[in-house]
Structures are given as structure tokens and as C-alpha cells.
């Protein structure tokens, strides 16, 4: 193998390792905010949201997480890693992608959009074009995992106009106290195994991202694009059964 190609592979491995470390901190912080939310004994009423807002309840949950915790508590993450002092959290940000099935350019509405990751030098990209996303879904029954899997399909099928990191995020608001995260993870794996659209290299496996949180997982897939690039998804399965009320 030519020396230049060897150096390129080595450098990319280093860049991916640095990026993974940065994403790991972000996921740790997201879990920390979830635990703060639980400590505050915060509850969200489905009937109140229906009667007093025009938001879908899933959107309301993610907006509350961003507005009440991820944005105002950022000192927790900046103290942990100085490179994320400028980190930015928002929701329903739109980015462009090309649909590989019909070739049309479309808008990708991102549930939780996270940028200012301080990785522009590593990826040789504009800072604004480097971002990490977390897609959110409510889960009341195991059948809701069908919608959860649809976000995986988006990850594998969409050819994004701007740079895309080899890491993606998904968050489940599990509202049914009888649904343990292991059951949800098993159901997601069952659906991945039966999917003809998703090329999975590694099914959901436990990955501890926070010392006091045991419901985080990772999976590895290939994008359905020319290069068939591999990417990882980090899955956060949050127990919202005591947070969501009627």
C-alpha cells in the first residue's frame, strides 16, 4: 500500500477516534440532563399539551429536554471537556439531502441538532457543517419500534449535501413502565434482522456511556450509498414512565 494511502487511513482513524470521544461526552451530558430531569421530579401531561399547545407530544418532550436542560445546563459539559465550551443545541433544524430512490433534493428535519463541536480542523470542514443529531421517538408498546426503525432507514438511505459524521444518535421516550429497555432493544434487533432495507453489521449491544445509567446501546450499519460507508448509532432508552402523565 502506498505511504500516502497508509497515512490517510491512519489519520482518518485518529480523526474518528477524536470524534468518538467528543460524541461520547455529548451523550454522557444528555444522560446527565435526563437524570437531572428525573431528580427535579418533572412531569409532562399529555392532556395539558393537547389542550394548551399545538405541538405533537413527542415534539414537546424533545423541546423541553433541549430548552430546560440541554441548553441551560451546559456548564456541566464545558467543565468536563473544554473543546465543547461553544456547543449548541437546537431542535427541528433542517438540512438538505438527496433521496437515493427518486434522486430529488429534500429537507431533513432533525429532532435534536448539536453543533459547535470543535472538529473543523480534524475533518477539514466548516464548523457549521459538522454536527451530531439525535432522533427521538415515543414508545408505548413494542409495536412503536416500527417507527423507531424508520429513523435507521433514514440514516442509511439519505445522501446528505453537507458533511455527515460516522456517528448518529437515537433517543426513545419509553412511556410504559412495563417495557424494560432490554425488551425494547430486543424488539429493535428483531426488526433490524428482518429489514430488507438496513444493512446491519452489529445489532444493538450495551455500551455504558454514563456511570449511573445502564440503558445505552450501540449498533453499526452501512449506508446505502456508493461507498457503503459504515457508521455507528448510539441508542439512549430513557424511562419516561414516571415523567409522562395523562
Image: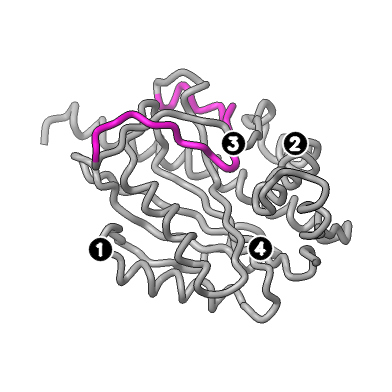
Secondary element at tag 2: loop
Q: Which comes sooner in the sequence, label 2 or label 4?
A: 2
> Farthest front residue?
51
Q: Which residue is mark 1?
A: 196
- Judge left or right: residue 182 versus residue 176: left
Specify how the rendered protein is coloured: one colour
Q: Report how far apart the C-alphas of labels 1 and 2 lie in the structure.
A: 38 Å
Residue in the foreground of this view, choosing between 99 and 10: 99
Secondary element at tag 3: strand
Q: Which comes sooner in the sequence, label 1 or label 3?
A: 3
Q: Position of residue 32 (x, y in %)?
A: 73, 53
Q: Which residue is mark 2?
A: 71
Residue in the foreground of this view, choosing between 138 and 215: 138
**Residue at 55%, 46% in the rendered image:** 134
Q: Report how far apart the C-alphas of labels 1 and 3 lie in the structure.
A: 29 Å
In this picture, which residue range is highlighted in magenta?
Answer: 102-123
Q: Report how far apart the C-alphas of labels 2 and 4 lie in the structure.
A: 19 Å
Q: Identify whether 22 is placed above or below 210.
A: above
Residue in the foreground of this view, choosing between 41 and 18: 41
Q: Which residue is mark 4?
A: 238
Q: Which residue is mark 3?
A: 92
Q: Which comes sooner in the sequence, label 4 or label 3?
A: 3
- Mark 1 vs mark 2, foreground winner is 1
Q: Few, some or many C-alpha atoms within 10 Å of disc 1 (few <14, some 14-19, many ≥20)?
A: few
Q: Which comes sooner in the sequence, label 4 or label 1?
A: 1
- Judge left or right: residue 60 versus residue 135: right
Amino acid at each position: 500500500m502506498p505511504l500516502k494511502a497508509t497515512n490517510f487511513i491512519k489519520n482518518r482513524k485518529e480523526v474518528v477516534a477524536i470524534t468518538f470521544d467528543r460524541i461520547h461526552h455529548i451523550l454522557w451530558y444528555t444522560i446527565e440532563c435526563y437524570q437531572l430531569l428525573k431528580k427535579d421530579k418533572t412531569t409532562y401531561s399529555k392532556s395539558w399539551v393537547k389542550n394548551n399547545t399545538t405541538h405533537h407530544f413527542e415534539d414537546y418532550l424533545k423541546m423541553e429536554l433541549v430548552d430546560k436542560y440541554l441548553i441551560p445546563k451546559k456548564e456541566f459539559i464545558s467543565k468536563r471537556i473544554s473543546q465543547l465550551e461553544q456547543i449548541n443545541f437546537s431542535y427541528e433544524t433542517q438540512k438538505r439531502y438527496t433521496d437515493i430512490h427518486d434522486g430529488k433534493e429534500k429537507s431533513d428535519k432533525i429532532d435534536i441538532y448539536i453543533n459547535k463541536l470543535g472538529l473543523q480542523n480534524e475533518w477539514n470542514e466548516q464548523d457549521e457543517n459538522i454536527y451530531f443529531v439525535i432522533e427521538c421517538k415515543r414508545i408505548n408498546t413494542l409495536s412503536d419500534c416500527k417507527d423507531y426503525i424508520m429513523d435507521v432507514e433514514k440514516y442509511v438511505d439519505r445522501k446528505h449535501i453537507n458533511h455527515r459524521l460516522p456517528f448518529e444518535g437515537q433517543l426513545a421516550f419509553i412511556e410504559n413502565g412495563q417495557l424494560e429497555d432490554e425488551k425494547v432493544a430486543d424488539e429493535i434487533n428483531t426488526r433490524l434482522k428482518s429489514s430488507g432495507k438496513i444493512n446491519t453489521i452489529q445489532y444493538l449491544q450495551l455500551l455504558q456511556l454514563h456511570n449511573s445509567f445502564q440503558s445505552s446501546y450501540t449498533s453499526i450499519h452501512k449506508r446505502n450509498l456508493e461507498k457503503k460507508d459504515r457508521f455507528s448509532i448510539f441508542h439512549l432508552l430513557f424511562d419516561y414512565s414516571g415523567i409522562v402523565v395523562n
